[in-house]
Image (spheres, rainbow, N blue to C red):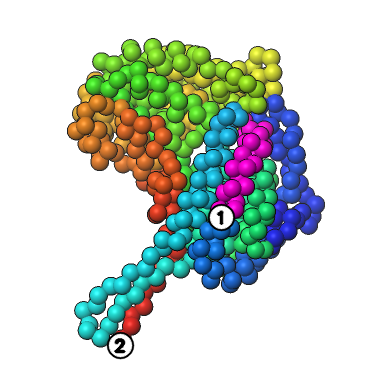
Amino acid sequence: MFINGAWATEPSGSEFEILNPATGGVIKSLPDGGAEAARAAIDAAAEALVTWRVTTPYQRAEFLMRAHALMLERQEDLAKVMTAEQGKPLRAAMTEVKYASDFLQWFAEEGKRVYGEIIPSARADQRFHVLHQPVGVVAAITPWNYPISMITRKLGPALAAGCTVVLKPAEATPLTAVETFKIFEDAGFPPGVVNLVTAGDPKPVGEEFTSNPKVAKLTFTGSTAVGKLLAGKAAGNMKRVSCELGGHAPFLVLKDADPVHAAKGLQLVKFLNTGQACISPNRIFVHRDVLDGFLDTLSGRVGGMKAGNGMEQGVTIGPLVNEAAVAKVENQVNDAVAKGAEVLCGGTRLTDGDLGQGHFFAPTVLTDVTPEMLIYREETFGPVAAVVPFDDDDDVLAMANDTHYGLAAYVYSQNLSQAMRLFEGLEFGIIGINDINPASAAAPFGGMKDSGLGREGSREGIHEYLETKVGGFSI
Ligand code: ADP
């Protein structure tokens, strides 16, 4: 753990193990921090806030830019740690480190553009001046699927805004967080500005984060169930909350779409991170006129993927995070098949040879998926493309919106009017139009409905860490 500028162990000596999901082996043990460690970290952050909040955005940008440069310098080492504990192929881990570094750079710059406002008053003797100030101590909780970019997407804007931070990373992937904090240490952030509490059991730390009066803001990325639980507790203590939660992205391939282009895009985005992404397509609606071309291309490409240990050359898809994740995927596939879905490729666990030691499921394509199936409603978080054929473009908007999630959606169409109609009508925060990567440090990321509160990245992202203050001046 990293508290008040120094590396720390848990006073009780308690530790937890971090496993490699490709091999089942133990990589390392880390301190199992509890409420006491969280309290110490929050105290340090509260003390550091006094001086950090009054530094200039130019000074804060210097720290962030040093961290940005170090992250790129250490890109490969960070990626190797990430692949070992999370499973994604090394190339994907390298891409994620770059994406993570983007948030440090973007918010270093954006911190300089936190403009106020002067508002004319109805009274001749009055002036309104509006300014934005750091919200205070931020408690951050991050997930295991994107172990580094979810950290910088929160800490970048928080630090640029003048807040101090305590982070609790996911118990499956804290080693990447430790390496990230070595970067913050080497970038010279003053003691207490950034703090890390690792924990095998997240509950005591979560309790402290949501109840400690010194915490002003909770920012969380993870499941909708845990997000609602923590947001509820934090709201009870009137803390500011941002949540980036689950999704159930529709992927719409309309009558006039190029089915080959759409299938190539789908294969890339669906199987990224072994399907373990909140913006992963979960229901793939394909017009029957283009269905055959779409399925041929998709099955061909998915059938050619190579599952394995992400450290090995040529591996294009890694393991799932743990056995529970494999069991969930298997259950959704079996349920779909029992209710009439057809398996075009994959469909089972992978247990041959070394794969048997890890948590592997074959990249799978299902078609004839219907609303009665679990996969149509529940987030899969696994490598299964569930295709739902449809007959009329006019019906597909309502079908796509028929979910309590609202994070990402994708539309493939060559018809500008259709694409615009869907862009405006879809109840999702992030829409890819003939595009599978609508995420960037420059673009707002976040969801509607049960997918969360607030936006990360973009110029909006920093405002999640700022309060608005107005001064009425009588002259
Ligand atoms: P996932 O299903 O992606 O594992 P979780 O919501 O369980 O999502 O985990 C996301 C993050 O939330 C992790 O850092 C995890 O440790 C943390 N977390 C899970 N349960 C709690 C809890 N009760 N209190 C605080 N943090 C929690």
Real-space Cα separation, disc 1 to disc 2, in angstroms: 40 Å
**Mark 2 or mark 1, which is nearer the start of the sequence?**
1
Proximity of marks 1 and 2: CB atoms separated by less than 8 Å:
no
Q: Is residue 229 visible?
A: no
Q: Residue at x 51, y 67 (%)?
A: 56
Callout 1: 10 Å neighbours few (<14), some, many (20+)?
many
Residue 212, given in percent of the width and then of the height, sits at: 59, 65
Q: Is residue 279 visible?
A: yes
Q: Which residue is mark 1?
A: 64
Q: Which residue is mark 2?
A: 475
Magenta-drawn stretch, dominant element (helix, strand or loop) = helix
> Horizontal placement of 416 versus 87: left or right?
left
Where is 387 relative to 148, above or below? Answer: above
Q: Residue at x 22, y 23 (%)?
A: 392
Residue 20, given in percent of the width and then of the height, sits at: 68, 32
Residue 110, given in percent of the width and then of the height, sits at: 44, 56
Q: Quadrant of residue 11?
A: bottom right
Where is 446 relative to 260, above or below? Answer: below
Residue 151 colored magenta?
no
Where is 62 relative to 23, above or below? Answer: below
Which of these two is toward me, 458 or 246? 458
Q: Quadrant of residue 130?
A: bottom left
Q: Amino acid at mark 1?
A: Leu
Q: Quadrant of residue 120?
A: bottom left
SS class of the residue under badge 1? helix
SS class of the residue under badge 2? loop
